[in-house]
Structures are given as structure tokens and as C-alpha cells.
Amino acid sequence: MDSVANRYAVALLSIASDENSIKEYIDEIEQILEILKNNDGFVALLKSYGLTASEKKDAITNCFKDKIKANILNLFYVMIDNKRGGHILDVCKEFIRIARNKLHIKKGVVYTTIKLDEAQLLAMSQKVSKILNANVSLTNEIDTSLLGGFKIQVEDYIIDDSLKNRLEKLKDTIAKKGEA
């Protein structure tokens, strides 16, 4: 990761640690990241050489004041003052990465053919957390190509208990027996 983004992210993590509220900071930064990802124009504004630092800070203030922690807002101001406004997106991503790592939090996706309710999702998260020895948070995505069952992916760890996977394994077994 970019060393500039890492330095700012580490500084913010230090503040979050001092306040004993790393999880709350992660939640806010995730929301900010979603806003920034969905608003290319706002990110372009932060990168723009045609605007003054004051104008960029006013834009950030109008968008985020009283909606995010003051320390996050102040970090954004410092970045703009140091002509690093274009790195805010990278800093948010890096902060989430290092903060989750510090708290042993992993994000994952459970793919199913039907939508899971919160209780089912929580039960699966708890089971995968035990397997990976980490605090795993799963989201649910629909994948009708699975035909049935589920597939869980957490980083590079995959549990595939889908009907599609079972049928492929059965097909391979039959093919091997046919060769013998």
C-alpha cells in the first residue's frame, strides 16, 4: 500500500486506539468509503488543483461535519493542508485494513440461492469465526448458479458446500471410475 496512505492510516489508528474505539472508527470509515466510492465527482474535487485548500475543506465540512468523528474530519483537513486530499480514499481503505487486522476482524461473503435472515447469517459467522480463529463478519449475496447449498469466502479461505460443487465432484468421480 502507498506509504502516504499508510502513515495517515496508522496515525488515525493510534488515535482510535487511544480512545479505545477502533471498531467505531472502522464503522465510520466504512461509511465514508462507501460515500466516496459512489461519488467520483467529490473525489475529483479533492484531487483538483483548481480549488484552494480552504474550498476543499469547506466541501468536506459541508459533507461530513457533525456526521463523523471530529478526529476523522481533522485528519481530512490536515491531509488537504498537506496537499494530500487525493489520497483520502486510499487512507480510508488502508485504515480499515490495518484496524481490522489489529482487532482480528475478517470480512467475508456467504453466497446462497436464497436470502439468509440475520439469525442464519450470525450462526454462520460464529462457526466460521471458530474455524479461522478470528472475528468473522459475513454478508449475504445471492448466487443462483450454486443451485442450492452455500459457498463462503473469507479472504482466500473458501468453504464450498453448494449443490453445484457437489455435482462437479460427482462428475469427476464418475469420470475417474470410467477411466479405470
Image (tube, rainbow, N blue to C red):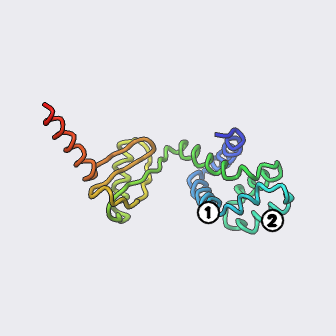
Residue 9 in the image, given as x and y percentages of width and height: 67, 45
Residue at 67%, 67% in the rendered image: 67
Residue 90 in the image, given as x and y percentages of width and height: 66, 48
Task: Give the residue type at disc 2.
Answer: Asp
- Sequence order check, earlier mark of 1 and 2: 1
**Residue 177 vertical position relative to residue 97 in the rendered view, above or below:** above
| Alpha carbon distance from label 1 to label 2 | 20 Å
What quarter of the picture does the N terminus occupy? Answer: top right
- Judge from the rendering whether residue 98 lies leftward or rightward of residue 83; answer left or right: left
Residue lying farthest front?
Answer: 179
Residue 118: mark in rendering: none
Q: Nearer the viewer, mark 1 or mark 2?
A: 1
Task: Give the residue type at disc 1.
Answer: Asn
Residue 38: mark in rendering: 1
Residue 170 in the image, given as x and y percentages of width and height: 19, 44
**Circle 2 — which element?**
helix
Report crowding for label 2: few under 14, some 14 to 19, many 20 or more residues within 10 A (C-alpha): some
Residue at 85%, 61% in the rendered image: 54
Foreground of the two, 51 or 74? 51
| Number of numbered callouts drawn | 2
Residue 58: mark in rendering: 2
Foreground of the two, 142 or 128? 142
**Residue 47 vertical position relative to residue 115 in the rendered view, above or below:** above
